[in-house]
Amino acid sequence: TPKEVIEYILDAVGYKPENEIRGKKILDPACGSGGFLVEATQRLVERYRRIGFNLRNPDDAKQIIEGCVNSIYGLDIHPFACFIAEMNLLFQLVDLYDAVSQKDKYYELPRLNVYRTDSLMPPSEAIELTEFTDNSRRKMLIEETKGANRVKKTNFDYIVGNPPYV
């Protein structure tokens, strides 16, 4: 998605650093490589900075990271797209992570809310494979499905994505 389109759509829905966007949840239901998620994260970090948070202060940086993780959500049907979206989001948070790890060398970034799923399908009701979690791939699939279901049941303040280009 061209950056100008992403900026236009986020501006049009009011997701701007000058607005109070902290604590607001935003979803891209077909996030691809995460263009909307990256721009939304940059705007959210800028919002924190504008209201006085110091991006190099470990306590402030930790609060910003948690704010971003709790606000930015993406879904995509393609697993590699999800991987790229997560990597792109990590690049947005790496300086904040560095600030936090200066104080707490054991700090781990929380799981980002990017999940592989068909966002047009309703949440699946039954995932009772817990007795088979000895297989790490199966366990990862169960956790991914549970996470996607959780996102599908969440209420969002903003839902953004590519416009239909036809």
Image (cartoon, helix red, strand yellow):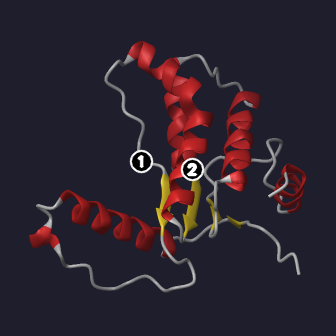
Element under disc 1? loop
Q: Is residue 153 above or below residue 69?
A: below
Q: Residue 15 location in percent, x, y?
A: 78, 54
Instruction: Please tell me the numbered disc located at residue 111.
Output: 1
Between 11 and 34, the residue placed more toward the observer is: 34
Q: Is residue 130 visible in the rendered structure shown here?
A: yes
Residue placed at 31% from the left, 23% from the top?
A: 106
Q: Position of residue 115 (x, y in %)?
A: 47, 63
Q: Which amino acid type corresponds to the residue marked 2 in the rendered image?
A: Ile
Q: Nearer the viewer, mark 2 or mark 1?
A: 2
Q: Residue 72 placed where, x, y %?
A: 59, 53
Calculate the distance from the C-alpha at mark 2 to the C-alpha at mark 1: 14 Å
Q: Determine whether, in the image, residue 90 is placed left or right of residue 31.
A: left
| Element assignment for label 2 | helix
| Count of marks overlaid on the render | 2
The residue to which callout 2 is attached is 84
Q: Nearer the viewer, residue 49 or 133?
A: 133
Q: Quadrant of residue 145?
A: bottom left
What's the residue at 68%, 34% (across, down)? 48
Q: Residue at x 71, y 52 (%)?
A: 35
Q: Quadrant of the N terminus?
A: bottom right
Camera-side residue: 23 or 9? 9
Of the two numbered discs 2 and 1 on the same chain, state the one appearing first in sequence: 2
